[in-house]
């Protein structure tokens, strides 16, 4: 059986057998991660492919003290964010977004209850349907475990706007999940 270390070392030597093994092992998970950022199927495939090309180009810099899956995930997320930035899908900021000071914690309990009562596919679908700017912040905060400061830096927005978008994403997600449930 081929170990993860074998795959990494094989990829460092540009052996296609090991590159295919790495892709086969991680592509389904990374496609799901990528789908949280990219809606269009063709764009998603392109971003996923570009991300794995970067993985193979940068595999020499992989440090064994990190999780390979986590390292790949970071590259895929950054590739998706770069794609969105390059295609001007990242920084559309409305004036009222900047002025929204809604309490971030509002309705969290209701949302938690809705999430607890639905299957993962329904939740994933509802997240995927969020408007891009909200889906990005939601995914980065809850799935990537980034702080508002880190999100603001990656998206080139203010920390306050990150908080606003997180709150709006939760409200939109709650509404979408309520429609699924009832």
Image: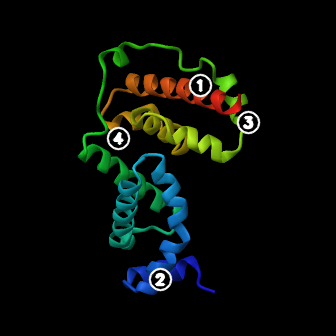
Q: Which mark is residue 116?
A: 3
**Contact between labelled residues 4 and 2, with CB atoms less than 8 Å apart:** no
Which residue is at 64% across, 42% downward? 122
Q: Which mark is residue 135?
A: none
Alpha carbon of mark 2 to alpha carbon of mark 4: how far? 32 Å
- Residue 91 lies in quadrant: top left
Alpha carbon of mark 4 to alpha carbon of mark 3: how far? 30 Å
- The residue wearing badge 1 is 175
Judge by depth and name the residue closer to the eye, 38 or 53: 38
Q: Residues within 10 Å of mark 2 (few under 14, many from 20)?
A: many
N-term mark: 3 or 1: 3
- The residue wearing badge 4 is 154
Quadrant of the snapshot with the C terminus: top right
Q: Residues within 10 Å of mark 1 (few under 14, many from 20)?
A: some
- Residue 36 position, x and y percent, is 48, 46
N-term mark: 3 or 2: 2
| Residue at disc 2, secondary structure | helix
Which residue is at 39% across, 50% downward? 40
- Residue 43 lies in quadrant: bottom left
N-term mark: 2 or 4: 2
Q: Residues within 10 Å of mark 4 (few under 14, many from 20)?
A: some
Alpha carbon of mark 3 to alpha carbon of mark 2: how far? 39 Å
- Residue 71 position, x and y percent, is 46, 60
- Residue 7 position, x and y percent, is 50, 80
N-term mark: 2 or 1: 2
- The residue wearing badge 2 is 18
Whether 88 is drawn above or below 171: the answer is: below
């Amino acid at each position: 059986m081929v170990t993860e270390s074998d795959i990494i070392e094989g990829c460092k030597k540009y052996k296609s057998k090991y590159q295919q093994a790495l892709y086969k092992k991680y592509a389904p998970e990374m496609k799901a991660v990528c789908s949280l950022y990219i809606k269009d199927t063709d764009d998603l495939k392109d971003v996923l492919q570009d991300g794995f090309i970067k993985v193979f180009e940068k595999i020499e810099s992989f440090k064994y003290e990190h999780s390979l899956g986590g390292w790949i995930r970071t590259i895929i997320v950054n590739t998706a964010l770069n794609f969105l930035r390059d295609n001007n899908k990242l920084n559309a900021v409305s004036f009222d977004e900047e002025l929204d000071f809604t309490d971030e914690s509002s309705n969290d309990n209701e949302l938690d209850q809705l999430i607890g009562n639905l299957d993962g596919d329904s939740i994933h679908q509802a997240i995927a349907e969020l408007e891009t700017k909200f889906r990005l912040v939601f995914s980065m905060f809850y799935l990537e475990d980034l702080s508002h400061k880190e999100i603001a830096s990656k998206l080139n927005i203010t920390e306050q706007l990150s908080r606003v978008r997180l709150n709006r994403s939760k409200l939109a997600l709650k509404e979408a999940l309520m429609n699924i449930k009832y």
